[in-house]
Image: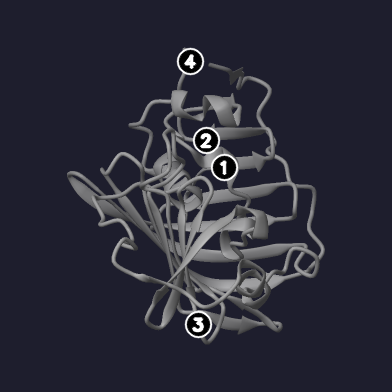
């Protein structure tokens, strides 16, 4: 066996959607008809909240509405994250734990508790698994999306927002008054891409950090979408070891 079946609940799909998403077709951010903005890349990046030094841990709970061809499902997601690892636990609508995913910089471990299956893939191999492209977004990076000055090639004026075109052809939409990220569009980036689009909404002040309470993620393949609504969120608390305790009789499959 070299992959986890897609039929094991929607648990693995949810992990994919939250960290990378799947989506119905969405229009790419348009910039061809926009004027260049009167702002430098340095100034744009400086106005964007960057908590990479101050925000070191995060724990939270939320509800995910997963929509895909043939139907939709709501599940609860519990997550804990530091700068190097993110641990996610999925529960069904009646609170039954379906499985976990451990995201690390060079690998992702997926445990389907219902079927007693575990799989470990590298970021480069993520398309070989039903987890898709989950292997490259730590939860802290998802909630606080930042860019480097060196990535910015052009900046366009889009009314209330700036549209930054990056070197990998991703487009990042940033609010002029807040500096907060509104959308991240990778639909024009060279394949393979981890997701098509991320939309951020409902920013709130969490212990002086401006973080989104609603994240909608669309996939590269144009098939599904997930909307993640944060119910509880705390930051910079002490975390237990972030790991998955696999039963002795559950082997780890590698593609």
- Label 1 or label 3, whichever lies nearer to me, is 3
Task: Calculate the distance from the C-alpha at mark 1 to the C-alpha at mark 3.
Answer: 38 Å
The residue sitting at 69% across, 64% down in the picture is 58
Q: Nearer the viewer, residue 122 or 149?
A: 149
- Label 2 or label 3, whichever lies nearer to me, is 3
**Residue 196, numbered circle:** none
What residue did someone put label 1 on?
100
Image spot of residue 231 (x, y percent): 51, 73
Q: Earlier in the sequence, mark 1 or mark 2?
A: 1
What residue did someone put label 4 on?
2
Query: Horizontally, is 57 left or right of 11 in the view?
Result: right
Task: Calculate the distance from the C-alpha at mark 2 to the C-alpha at mark 4.
Answer: 17 Å
Q: Earlier in the sequence, mark 3 or mark 4?
A: 4
> Residue pushed farthest bottom?
177
Q: Secondary structure at mark 3?
A: loop
> Residue 226, relative to residue 110: is it above or below?
below
Crowd tier of the residue under label 2, counting other residues whose Cα lies within 10 Å: few below 14, some 14–19, many 20 or above: some
Image spot of residue 223 (x, y percent): 26, 43
Q: Nearer the viewer, residue 249 or 52?
A: 52
Query: Horizontally, is 83 left or right of 159 in the view?
Result: right
The residue sitting at 78% across, 69% down in the picture is 236
Query: Horizontally, is 220 left or right of 174 in the view?
Result: left
Contact between labelled residues 2 and 1, with CB atoms less than 8 Å apart: yes
Colouring:
one colour
């Amino acid at each position: 066996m070299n992959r986890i079946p897609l039929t094991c609940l929607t648990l693995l799909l949810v992990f994919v959607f939250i960290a990378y998403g799947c989506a119905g077709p969405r229009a790419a951010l348009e910039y061809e008809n926009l004027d260049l903005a009167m702002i430098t890349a340095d100034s744009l990046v400086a106005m964007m909240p960057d908590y990479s030094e101050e925000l070191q841990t995060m724990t939270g709970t939320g509800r995910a509405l997963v929509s895909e061809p043939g139907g939709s499902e709501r599940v609860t997601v519990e997550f804990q994250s530091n700068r190097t690892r993110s641990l996610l636990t999925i529960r069904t609508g009646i609170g039954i734990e379906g499985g976990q995913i451990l995201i690390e910089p060079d690998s992702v471990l997926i445990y389907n508790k219902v079927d007693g299956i575990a799989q470990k893939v590298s970021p480069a191999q993520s398309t070989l698994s039903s987890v898709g492209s989950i292997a490259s977004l730590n939860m802290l990076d998802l909630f606080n999306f930042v860019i480097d000055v060196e990535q910015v090639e052009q900046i366009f004026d889009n009314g209330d927002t700036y549209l930054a075109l990056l070197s990998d052809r991703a487009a990042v939409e940033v609010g002029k008054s807040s500096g907060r990220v509104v959308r991240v569009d990778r639909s024009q980036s060279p394949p393979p891409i981890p997701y098509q689009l991320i939309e951020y909404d409902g920013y709130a002040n969490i212990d002086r950090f401006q973080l989104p309470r609603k994240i909608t993620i669309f996939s590269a393949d144009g098939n599904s979408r997930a909307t993640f609504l944060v119910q509880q969120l705390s930051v910079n608390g002490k975390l237990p070891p972030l790991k998955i305790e696999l039963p002795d009789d559950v082997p780890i499959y590698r593609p």
